[in-house]
Amino acid sequence: MPAHTSVPVRIRGREFRVRTNGDEETLQRVAKHLDETLTRIEKRTGTVDSLDVALLAGLNLSREVVELRDARASAGAVPGGRLEALTLLAESALQPEG
């Protein structure tokens, strides 16, 4: 298992150090997406309270996640489900009959 590393990310002009066992590039992309979402919501709504902007961003990002999950479920792609089914099929084909 990879060790956790501390990665600096910049959100709303502030630096945060985030511990991750993933790759730094992905974390940077996530932080950038959040920062852009916060900026877009602030401009669109005229809201200046940081908490309100963060809550609205969280709501928008959560909606995106739910829509993606619903789309996957509609397409029959349950996370891990298809891969697991293919693995079981492959394993059953390798087992000797008897």
Image (cartoon, rainbow, N blue to C red):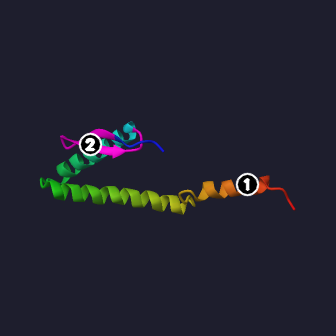
Q: Earlier in the sequence, mark 1 or mark 2?
A: 2
Q: Which residue is mark 1?
A: 91
Q: Give, as a single range, the part of the protein colored magenta.
A: 6-23
At 53% from the left edge and 62% from the top edge, which residue is drawn?
74
At 67% from the left edge and 54% from the top edge, which residue is drawn?
87
Disc 2 is placed on an element classified as strand
x, y (%) of residue 8?
A: 27, 38
Say which of 37 and 17 sits in front.
17
Q: Quadrant of the C terminus?
A: bottom right
**Taking 30 as reference, is 45 left or right?**
left
Numbered tag placed on residue 17 in the rendering: 2
Is the stretch drawn in magenta largely helix, strand or loop? strand
At 27% from the left edge and 48% from the top edge, which residue is drawn?
37
Disc 1 is placed on an element classified as helix
Q: Is residue 14 above or below residue 58?
A: above
Question: Disc 1 marks which amino acid?
Answer: Glu
